[in-house]
Amino acid sequence: MNAKPICILVVAMFLIGNSAYAGSWNKDKNSAGINAFDKRAKKLSFFEIIIQMLFFKFLLPLNMQVIKPEPLDEGDVVKIYNGFVYAQAFYPYFENVTKIELPISIVKKSLNSRSAGSIKRIATGKESSKSGFVRVTSAHPISYNELGDLVVMLCNDSNGLPGDVIAEKRFSPEEVKASNGNLIWDMKDGYALIRAADDPYWQKHNMQPRNEEYGSKVYYIIVTADGGSDTWLKRAYYTWEKGGSMTENATNGSAFMKYPESNTWTEIGDFTLAFNMQGALGYEKPDGVVKYYGLFLTQPAYKQWTKKFASRFLGEHIIYAPPREYKYELDEIYGTLESIDAESDGDDVIIFYICGPGGPLDVFGVTADELVKRFDRMGAGGMCMIFSGCWSGTFVAYPPLRKENRVIMSSVGWQEVSTPQKYDPMPFVYFFNEALKKGYTTAESCFAYAKEKTEEVSKDFPYGPQHHPQIYDSYPAENPDGGELTIAR
């Protein structure tokens, strides 16, 4: 705040004489709460009236403005307005960006009409001997600098700092407000190419265009906006949440900020800025042929049963049972998923099944977070996931797994344990297999059949709680209620 003008004016008014301020608050409940002053006070001179007019009309509002803006971060967000620029570095695991999601909201407030108006000198009626000043309300709220469009850019790196702009998108304040804190830049109609699979860079460095090698190059998401303000009289700005990437499909670098009309970037060491990014590797572009790839993880005792179960799905699948009863070889499992990623493209369907002892977000040591890393790199057109085990409903409820074109199912709810009883390997999987044998061909129809049967038989279990299978269905992404994911012949 610039307090100097107001201090000078207050001192000047005091030197002129303060008899005009020798009053008290009017107690009349119908007086609109005015500050009234003694009628017998000395009459103000023309010079004094001019000073007071300048004070209330110009200098007081001026003092409420941010004369020299400072970078503002407040709690869990940074404020974007008036030419401030924020940037977040990231290391992608793909070559073509298809979507950027940003937790950005808008704040736009001003004083209401009752507290925002002009000030006039008045004389009270016969019931009082007071006179003075009253705030006269205006028909319109006080005006303030309009907040401009939010500008989002995707930029190259230049010696460790944001460089050339690859792509740019403008969002109006109305679009940001309508996004409800999840602003989406959808690039499906035209990939923003970061580095295509046929880029000479790969051959020059004797590298394959794969996610591991590609993750060493840094890019930036940049956000800025003109106009706006942040005072107690006027608030108009955008907020960007702190916290790093919302999923593991991009590894965070540092956050940066730049002052208005400055060319110097300043690295922020205290926090990073949240984002989510989706994309595809160059070889994941659809080829017009739908292929099915699956990985079925089970216990040794159910390996033969699982082979028959997998054979009812479309495609050829990998069956894996651990050499020991309660331990998967995790490197082998995750490596298999990465091999499936390398083979599949944007037309294909991935099927993932796991059954065994577990806990929240964990089956046999296979964790939700590690699966998120692998699944988010896959550019498949559809994914079917079946989790069977105690607390397997936690996988269905886990937000990072709940992405477009996925059907995620569990044998029980998120707080339930799973027991086979007489339905090996688990009741839900038993009836899911029965649905496939009966001719059901989609993930959704098989789930509906298995859920009904599982809940019916589990009512009579002699021990253990009732089972309540869960589902998350976002297939197809463009109309989740208008189609089902085909998984069987």
Image (cartoon, rainbow, N blue to C red):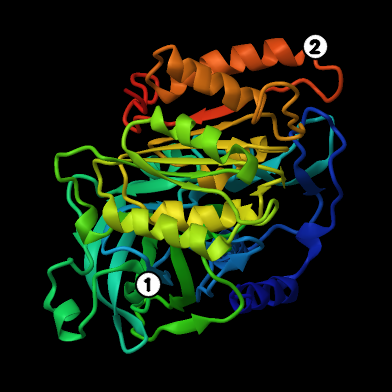
Question: Which residue is tagged 2?
Answer: 460
Q: Which residue corresponds to the image point at 42% horizontal and 65% vertical from the top-left?
A: 82
Say if 194 sits above or below 387 in the image.
below
Question: Which residue is tagged 1?
Answer: 212
Q: Which residue corresponds to the image point at 62% horizontal and 12% vertical from the top-left?
A: 453
Looking at this view, name the residue that lies furthest to the bottom: 159
Disc count in the image? Answer: 2
Q: Position of residue 167 (x, y in %)?
A: 23, 62
Label 1 SS: helix
Give the camera-side residue of 247 and 422: 422
Asked if residue 238 can be seen in this view, the reply is no
Q: Position of residue 365 (x, y in %)?
A: 66, 55
- Taking 439 as reference, is 306 left or right? right
Quarter of the N terminus within the rendering: bottom right
Amino acid type of disc 2?
Asp
Q: Position of residue 327 (x, y in %)?
A: 67, 56
Quarter of the C terminus within the rendering: top left
Say if 259 sits above or below 273 in the image.
below
Crowding at dot 1, Cα within 10 Å, few <14 / some 14-19 / many 20+, comes out as: few
Q: Position of residue 396 (x, y in %)?
A: 59, 36
Label 2 SS: loop
Give the camera-side residue of 220 and 26: 220
Give the camera-side residue of 330 and 378: 330
Amino acid type of disc 1?
Glu
Q: Which residue corresponds to the image point at 66% horizontal and 40% vertical from the top-left?
A: 394
